[in-house]
Amino acid sequence: MTPTDHTAKLLAILLQLALVAPALPAQDVDYTFHAQTELVLVNVTVRDKNGNFVRNLKPEDFSVKEDGKAQNVISFDLENTDAVATAEVAQTKLLGPQLSKPATPTAPANEVATALGAFKDRRMIVLFFDLSSMEPDQIDHASTAALNYVAKQMAPADLVAVVSLGDSLQVNQDFTDDRAALKKVLQSFGSGAGQGFENGSTGSTEDTPDTGGSFTVDDTEFNIFNTDRRLEALRSIAASLSHVEQKKSLIYISNGMTRTGLENQSELRAATNAAVRANMSIYTLDITGLEAIVPGGEAQSASLRGVSVYSGATAMNAMNANFASQETLVTLAGDTGGKAFLDSNDFGKVFKGVQDATSTYYILGYHSTNLARDGHYRRITVQLKGAGYKIEYRRGYYAPADFKHSTQEDRERQLDEELASDLPSTDLPVYLAAGYFRIGNDRFFVPISLAVPGQEIPFVSNSTRDKATLDIVGEALDSSKRSVGDMRDTVKLAVDTSAAVKQKNVQYDSGFVLPSGKYHLKFVVRENQTGRMGSFETDIVVPDFKTDPMKMSSVVLASQIQPATKHGKIDDPLVRDGSEMIPNVTHVFTNGQHLYLYYEVYDPGHEAAANGKAKAPSGSVRILSNVAFFQGSVKTFETPLVETKEISASDMARHAAVVQLDVPLTQLKPGFYTCQVNVIDDAAGHFLFPRLAMLVRQPKPVAPTPGGQ
């Protein structure tokens, strides 16, 4: 075993905890990482006027300021990967005896420091294969590109690790310069390794292939239908490598990262800032390469529904989908100092780009003179003595915050600042579901459901009950970034045993009344025992029904109906006849539950030419609806048609025909399904087929604690 093989075990040690838990742990969000010594590290690349690296600078040549105040540089190091080509033998002899035993997190500090020192003047590259998003032929292309790099481009200074995400996050190969070991791992990524679940359709059936569309899968309840799992994987890798001072480069290989619904945009920012904090640049490679967009679909695709293929809308939708899948890749690369490699079949460019960007750089370290733990952004300025140099460095970081020593006023300000911050906190997992229901002329009720896993909430026990409190703030911003709705609430939890809550989720329901338009929703939740906060941000479009042939609300899926607790919420359609439907945020059910669906059809029975002003004459309302469940292209179950022939008195003001279905899930085997809601306005001759993804699981064993499930 080579010395670099010994040092390579550090990645496996640091990732060990992340791989054990089903949900990857959240990390503090900063622009530079802070170890226990609160050392601030700044990477500085210096080039002369000809673009060549400058390697002969000394600590006294640099001047570092934080918010305009001079800082004392206490550590200085030059990383020069070109030196490995001539000094590799001497380095091997020096490090071999000291690395006979791998360092562990519980080892003495000097042992860990010795292991970390092995990365001096080495270029650290992580190859991250997102197998969950790639099709079999794309996996072949990705492994071939990586094999070509190992065989032809890999330099003596390169230490390479291979990580993959399929059903779980795995370290396939620790950091090593052993080409044979890397080739063996990369050749193991065969066509059968992929999942191919990305980029499935869950919306209207117009302009979609005539098959049951696939959808993104995940092995955690909250991240089944969004991109959080991959973003948290990136954040976990960054946190695991934050103990290594040297610059790290992660090459994220996927076929894009399509956002499938109400994803948490806070997770994206948290992932990028965790990477910056760990001194890790992300280089994204879209393995799809350069491909033509065929207006009628590719030959292997089924025929498309609707008329979009004849109007040009299909080609436009395909281009928009391609852009959406690449947008997140560009953000990840741009915000971490990396680069996105898109629309090119020359996959070797990404490896050359990483090598060029990590050839020579300086690492400056200082202890900040600002001891306040206020969480504020601090700007860094680096200057050089002399002229003619071009320097590159990151411009700042966020200071740590201390919750226990803050006053009530400080805590309120903390919530307000978090709500307004562009750098969100995701220490506390928060998940959100939203929809829209018409309640008047261009007025819509937008229900908001927030969920926090019960196991994430710390309870304080007293003689009789376990208690905890959650502070919640939120707002809705219009397209001009103006606040059009806000809320502030404190939720007090008191239970006989917190063990019962830890097996469930704590859900908070609220909502806004908004006109049609595009909005940005942001909510912040804080648990008040340790002060951990979580943010959820997403965009939502409230439609303008004026020109729509058929006007329909969003579809709410639920597994629970309870006595109404929302006093005064007369605008909430989910509260009816003394009962309240509780939206299922995760779309995860057990086959022993009932699936409740609720949706509304507005102005039924009239033609679109009336522009929404005409009302259907008496007796002309006839809405037919049912639900079909697909697995792949196979319809596994379909409910009988339900007929709605009238508008109830309570819904007359909104002119809404209400459809509420109750589907016993005993008919469905455990697995993933596309739930297609079929809605036909028989009187007007219009129809819609919205689709949603859902998972049916086996019921959990009954826990021995009171109230457990």
Image (cartoon, rainbow, N blue to C red):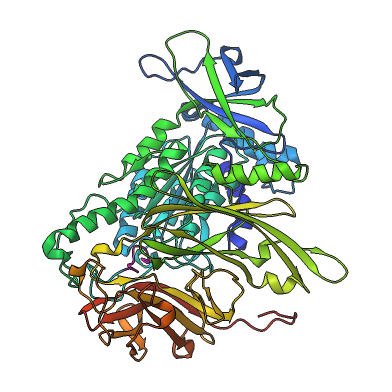
Residue 613 location (% of width, % of height): 26, 68
Residue 204 location (% of width, % of height): 29, 70
Residue 247 location (% of width, % of height): 52, 35
Choose between 234 and 30: the one closer to the eye. Answer: 30
Q: Residue at x 65, y 80 (%)?
A: 709
Regarding residue 651, the answer to whether it shows in the image is yes
Tell me, yes or no, whether the highlighted magenta stretch contains residue 198.
Answer: yes
For residue 137, which quarter of the picture? Answer: bottom left
Residue 189 location (% of width, % of height): 39, 60
Count every numbered label the image shows and give the total: 0
Q: Which residues are magenta?
A: 195-203
Regarding residue 6, the answer to whether it shows in the image is no
Q: Residue furthest top?
A: 386
For residue 490, which quarter of the picture? Answer: bottom right
**Image side of residue 421 versus residue 112, left or right:** left
Q: Residue at x 33, y 77 (%)?
A: 632
The relative height of residue 592 versus residue 18 in the rendered view (above or below) is below
The relative height of residue 127 versus residue 440 in the rendered view (above or below) is above
**Image side of residue 656 versus residue 237, left or right:** left
The relative height of residue 373 versus residue 260 in the rendered view (above or below) is above
Choose between 99 and 49: the one closer to the eye. Answer: 49
Tell me, yes or no, whether the highlighted magenta stretch contains residue 445.
Answer: no
* Dominant SS type (magenta): loop
Q: Residue furthest right?
A: 463
The relative height of residue 668 versus residue 541 in the rendered view (above or below) is below
